[in-house]
């Protein structure tokens, strides 16, 4: 299965939900990358975000549909917009179905069950109303959106409606996907008053408060995790080598599901590789997988 979205937060969530039901996933960061992958590989299902750079979801769908082997492949649209006109446009472009953010697991699995054997009842998360417990997902959200208020201020100053719309549209979808309910609800109010984020208006104090509260909560969660890991038993070189061997294939495949390996790598390691592991964790959080692969190989050569 191929999924494409230009925000890491959304890719991480989709990948986690799909791998939970044992579906193999390949990711792309924009429409052009998704098209290139389809030109070289046959996927059973394609999930595309509507608003992506280079080629948006509509354009990517039309080009993928032109490929001889993709005339009947299910292509699912994902967007933060829930208006009928957007759904109509998606279906007219050649998409098979349409999902809105925040992604609801039961709707996603129910739709996929049309083409995959999925037991929907056994894979739903126990709590869908609290802030996500996935630290990697929260870090990704903070990395993607920490500067969004400054972007909005800049867009308002220049009357740049494109930056205004793109920033708010992506923040709405991602905040819903991590269950940041207060921020999501304030953004929904702004979406209505600003005519789908097309009209530049003022950012309410309530929205700014919700934004800063979520960023503070994520910072606190990350710090608590790091404190807990520092108390963990040190990794032996043999354990470290095993973790790296598990990590390497995921990096080669650009797999975002790295939470388990990253958690283990936060445990203390021998002084000879400590700086390398710290750098490796930084590269993983930045999704700099090529550099991360090089560091893994360097560490493996040291501990042999």
Image (cartoon, rainbow, N blue to C red):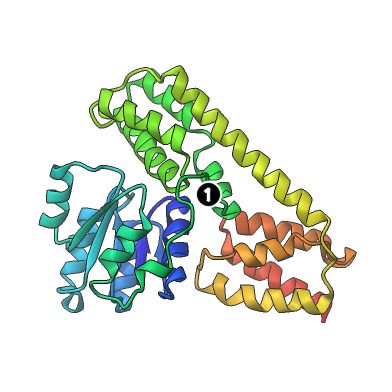
Callout 1 crowding tier (Cα within 10 Å): few <14, some 14–19, many ≥20: some
Q: Residue at x 64, y 57 (%)?
A: 283
Which percent across, then down, holds residue 197?
29, 30
Which percent across, then down, holds residue 191?
30, 30
> Looking at the rendering, in which quadrant would you find the N terminus?
bottom left
Residue 269: quarter of image: bottom right
**Is 232 drawn above or below residue 115 in the view shown?**
above
* Farthest residue, direction bottom: 304
Secondary structure of the residue carrying numbered label 1 = loop
Which percent across, then down, holds residue 182?
45, 32
* Farthest residue, direction right: 271
**Is 31 drawn above or below residue 20 in the view shown?**
above
Relative side of 222 to 61, left or right = right
Relative side of 242 to 156, left or right = right
Q: Nearer the viewer, residue 237 or 33?
A: 237
Residue bearing mark 1:
132
> Looking at the rendering, in which quadrant would you find the C terminus?
bottom right
Q: How many marks?
A: 1
Q: Residue at x 65, y 44 (%)?
A: 221
Q: Residue at x 87, y 67 (%)?
A: 270
**Is 119 drawn above or below residue 61 in the view shown?**
below
Relative side of 34 to 234, left or right = left
Relative side of 262 to 241, left or right = left
Which percent across, then down, holds residue 286?
59, 53
């Amino acid at each position: 299965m191929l999924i494409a979205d230009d925000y890491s937060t959304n890719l991480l969530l989709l990948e986690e939900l799909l791998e939970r039901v044992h579906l193999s996933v390949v990711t792309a960061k924009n429409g052009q990358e998704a098209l290139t992958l389809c030109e070289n590989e046959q996927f059973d299902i394609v999930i595309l975000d509507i608003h992506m750079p280079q080629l948006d979801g509509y354009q990517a769908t039309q080009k993928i549909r032109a490929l001889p082997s993709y005339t009947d492949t299910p292509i699912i649209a994902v967007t933060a917009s829930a208006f009928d006109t957007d759904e109509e446009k998606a279906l007219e472009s050649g998409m098979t179905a349409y999902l809105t953010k925040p992604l609801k697991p039961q709707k996603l699995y129910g739709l996929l069950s049309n083409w995959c054997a999925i037991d929907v009842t056994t894979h739903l998360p126990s709590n869908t109303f609290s802030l996500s417990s996935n630290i990697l997902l929260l870090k990704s959200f903070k990395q993607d959106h920490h500067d969004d208020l400054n972007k909005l201020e800049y867009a308002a100053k220049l009357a740049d409606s494109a930056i205004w719309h793109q920033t708010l549209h992506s923040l709405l979808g991602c905040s819903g996907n991590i269950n940041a309910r207060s921020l999501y609800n304030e953004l929904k109010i702004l979406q209505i008053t600003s005519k789908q984020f097309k009209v530049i208006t003022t950012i309410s104090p309530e929205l700014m408060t919700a934004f800063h509260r979520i960023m503070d909560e994520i910072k606190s969660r990350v710090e608590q995790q790091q404190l807990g890991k520092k108390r963990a038993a040190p990794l032996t070189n043999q354990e470290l080598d095993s973790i790296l061997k598990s990590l390497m294939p995921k990096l080669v495949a650009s797999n975002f599901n790295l939470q388990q390996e990253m958690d283990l790598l936060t445990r203390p390691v021998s002084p000879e590789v400590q700086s390398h592991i710290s750098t490796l964790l930084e590269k993983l959080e930045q999704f700099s997988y090529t550099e991360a692969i090089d560091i893994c190989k360097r560490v493996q050569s040291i501990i042999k």
